Image (spheres, rainbow, N blue to C red):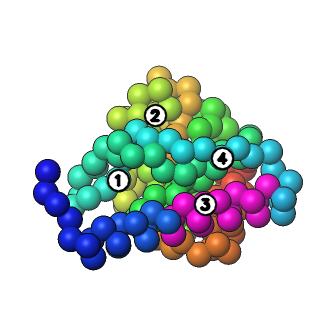
């Protein structure tokens, strides 16, 4: 294992502290401001995209779960939202708006390696793929490149509205 320089250690330390502090602050604010039923924890087993490939994260990252809505994950490269919807509920969503406004992935809720969406695919084609699949639950992940509190809050509300949840 390669030893890190003192500057690298300091950078990694500060980055994790920033991410964890943002998650804690956001959790405290959202549970009181919005009245959501929420939980907060640290979970490993996520993936991060490095050099266009997914890398497994053995280390835990903070995740806020908002009951009947979805999860908000705080990672070292940004914030993500994850939702799981019944197929019929997903088909009623405003997918066109979601595609226009957000960077996202849509995949099977049971078989997460089934990708229903890639950049450039139309909402109609996604809905057709979902309808023709055996998946009963559809996963939607939205990725933010912004870690500003208000942008996270407003983006989460916007996505929930577009998904009609």
Residue matched to label 4: 40
Residue on which the image places disc 2: 108
* Residue at figure coordinates x 30%, y 67% from the top left: 9
Q: Main secondary structure of the magenta part?
A: helix
Depth-wise, is mark 3 or mark 1 nearer the camera?
A: 3
* 69, 165: nearer the viewer: 69
Q: Secondary structure at mark 2?
A: strand
Residue at position x 21%, y 71% in the image: 5
| Mark 4 touches mark 3? (CB < 8 Å) | yes
In the rendered image, the residue lying farthest to the front is: 6
> Where in the figure is residue 85, as x and y percent of width and height?
62, 37
Q: Are marks 4 and 1 in contact (CB under 8 Å)?
A: no
- Rate crowding at label 1 as few (under 14), some (14 to 19) or many (20 or more) other CA atoms within 10 Å: some
User: In front: 75, or 17?
Assistant: 17
User: Which one is earlier in the sequence, the residue at label 4 or at label 3?
Assistant: 3
Image quadrant of residue 15? bottom left
Sequence-first tag of 2 and 3: 3
Q: Is residue 19 magenta?
A: yes
Please indicate, yes or no, whether residue 23 appears anywhere in the rendered image: yes
Residue depth check, mark 4 versus mark 1: number of the one nearer the observer: 4
Name the residue: 43% across, 71% down. 14
Which residue is nearer to you in this view: 34 or 109? Answer: 34
Q: Which residue is mark 1?
A: 48
State how many labels appear.
4
Query: Residue extending furthest left?
Result: 2
């Amino acid at each position: 294992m390669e030893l890190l320089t003192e500057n690298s250690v300091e950078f990694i330390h500060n980055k994790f502290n920033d991410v964890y502090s943002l998650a804690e602050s956001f959790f405290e604010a959202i549970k009181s401001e919005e009245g959501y039923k929420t939980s907060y924890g640290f979970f490993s087993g996520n993936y991060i995209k490095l050099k266009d490939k997914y890398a497994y994260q053995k280390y835990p990252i903070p995740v806020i779960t908002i009951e009947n809505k979805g999860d908000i994950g705080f990672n070292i490269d940004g914030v993500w939202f994850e939702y799981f919807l019944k197929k019929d509920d997903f088909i009623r969503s405003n997918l066109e708006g979601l595609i226009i406004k957000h960077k996202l992935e849509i995949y099977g809720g049971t078989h997460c390696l089934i990708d229903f969406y890639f950049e450039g695919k139309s909402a109609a084609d996604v809905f057709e793929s979902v309808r023709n699949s055996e998946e009963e639950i559809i996963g939607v992940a939205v990725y933010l490149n912004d870690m500003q509190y208000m942008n996270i809050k407003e983006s989460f509300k916007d996505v929930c509205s577009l998904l009609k949840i």
